[in-house]
Amino acid sequence: MSFGPFLLLAVLEGTVMAAVLALTAVGLSLVFGVMRVVNVAHGEFYMLGAVIAWFVTYYLPFPPALVWLAALIIAPLIVALIAALTDTLVLKRLNYDPEATIVATIGLLYMLQQAALTFYGPDARPVVAPFEWRIQLPWFGYSGYKLFVVVAAVVILAAVWLFMTRSKAGLVMRATQVDRDTAQAFGINVDRVYAGTFALGGALAAAAAVLIVPIQQAHYLMGHDPLLLSFIVVIIGGLGSIRGTLVAALVIGLSDGIISMFFSPTLAKIIATLLVALVLVFRPQGLFGAKA
Amino acid sequence: MTDGAKVWGLHLLVLAAVFAAQFLLPPYHATNLARIMVLAVFAMGYNIAFGYTGLLSLGHALFFAAGMYGMGLPVWHLEWVSVPALIAGLLAGGVMAGAVGVLALRTAGVSFMIVTLMFAQAGYLTLLYLNSWTGGDEGFVVASAARQAFGFSLATDTPRFTAAFVLFAAGLLACLWLVRSPFGRVMVAMRENEERSRMLGYDPFRVKLVALILSGLYAGLAGAAYGMLFGYVGASFATIQYSILPMLYVLLGGAGTVLGPFLGALLMFYLIDITSNYTDAYLFVVGAALVGLVLFAPKGILGTLRERAWRWLP
């Protein structure tokens, strides 16, 4: 394959990656923005989404498209429930102290990982794609499902955007983000907003995983990379700024896809992690976002 | 009895009990205890940064690994032997902590945690990337010719225990001396109120950097000793898990207490050891311990004891 088509392939792969990354990272960014909580277990919510999707598609006796759709609804719901419970039982009782919540979510990470290992096992298992359809380009064939992933991610992100900017619940969330005490004084149930935000963040990670699981396989350690990349995206985009997160997801997803195509993926990750550390040190408001 | 006498008495008593344990315990537990002592040195270093200075780092695995590879690489490529290699590891940990600290200490709180986490992750990936030099994922075995010190083989039980004990005792006494020294008080002042300390004329950046370097020296020594005494160097020791373990030990034993890291390492090691007889779900034990500690006992065992009864405990 000559350079042009090869670059096109890299860009396509990068776009798919960026779309899924944007979903995952927006969940993390939302939780940090509204609650000021760094959720280290976010990657495990993603992993749970994929594992639940496997269980749903394996045990429900419907055709592939239908079970996959069922998984896309069931997995985020279950993960949202787990997240809401975590918020009420653990994070709330820590008064959302930033350092204590990080330690607690690290604990949660290990517990969820172990639960997946015990009940799901150490194997990576595939989930059948809802449809098989190849787009034949002049140089190579490309999976139609991957393009569908991009479209689906954009639709979900647009829904989140509308929810945050147009709905009353979104307004309440933004009010809590700006000033928690004043929001409470105006009769907003801050506890419920926090539980809801944490649940929404988890659900977004789970949805991203359900989208990606027909391409990658479900595995109990699969949450590690998305967590790291989401961190990178959220920090480079500016902590708590959703617009910055989206831009950064596109840049990081694309460049990661392209760099790993031409160079070693490990080298791409080393550069990205160092970049994040340096951004936090020298430009804590992020490269794109306004002040967090 | 004055508080000073009580403090030295208690710590020397603990050291004597630990030393005597090797004659009383069966070999399996004596080896465990040697391992615990080395991990306790690591945790003591973590405690200097986190417990006393208030620097919650998620990147100490980087300093541990710097010590381990600072010892292991010269042994592998340059055929260095035990004592010079251990010193190289010690220094590597300190230098790495200094380099990370100069950058990371420009941030605080959550940013500091993420920056240290990212540096540690970059370090781990670099170990994998340079696999022709570092052995990558598989790591390498430390040559037994290098594991000789003063005519003894560190691969055998008694010299290994003694070496671990010497390092542990030196670390413990140095830590005790440090936290009772004027500089130790300034470290605590930084933890309690950085702005007020700055107003009193102390330079927070310098104090925190020195504390982090001391912490890195401990971590580096522990990493070097772990590789030397147990004969294996590998990239798995640079993973995030080895940043979490010392934090867990310190939280369990009591942050900001001299004996807390050892107590935490001892209890956690045996908690995992005993539960793994019944279930292989040991990660769950680690996770549940972390959540339980921050929820119900944020001061740890000795921290609570100091609050309730032994107010003189350093």
Image (cartoon, coloured by chain):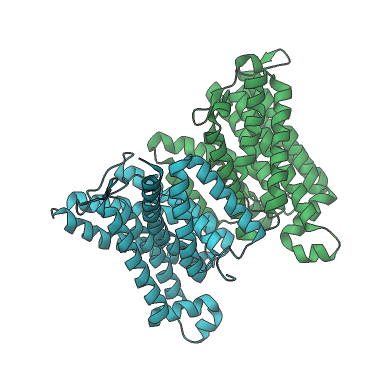
Q: Is residue A225 above or below residue B140?
A: below
Residue B138 image offset from top left, x and y in percent: 49, 28
Q: Residue furthest bottom?
A: A186
The image position of residue B66, as x and y in percent, is: 64, 35
Residue B65 found in image quarter = top right
- Output the letter for the chain in cyan: A
Please state the horizontal and vertical placement of residue A179, each as a whole percent of the image: 55, 79
Horizontal relation, residue B42 to residue A215: left or right: right
Q: Is residue B287 visible?
A: yes
- Residue B157: image quadrant is top right
Whether residue B58 can be seen here: no
Specify whether A55 is left or right of B103. Answer: left
**A185, above or below A19, in the image:** below
Residue B33: horizontal and vertical position, in percent?
A: 59, 30
- B164 vs A178, nearest the viewer: A178
Count the marks: how many? 0
Q: Nearer the viewer, residue B130 or A84?
A: B130
Write the residue at 46% across / 42% down: A262
Among the chains pictured, the one given green colouring is: B
Looking at the picture, does residue A58 appear above or below residue B85?
below
**Residue located at (39% from left, 37% from top):** B280
Residue A140 position by quadrant: top left
Q: Is residue B54 left or right of residue A253?
A: right
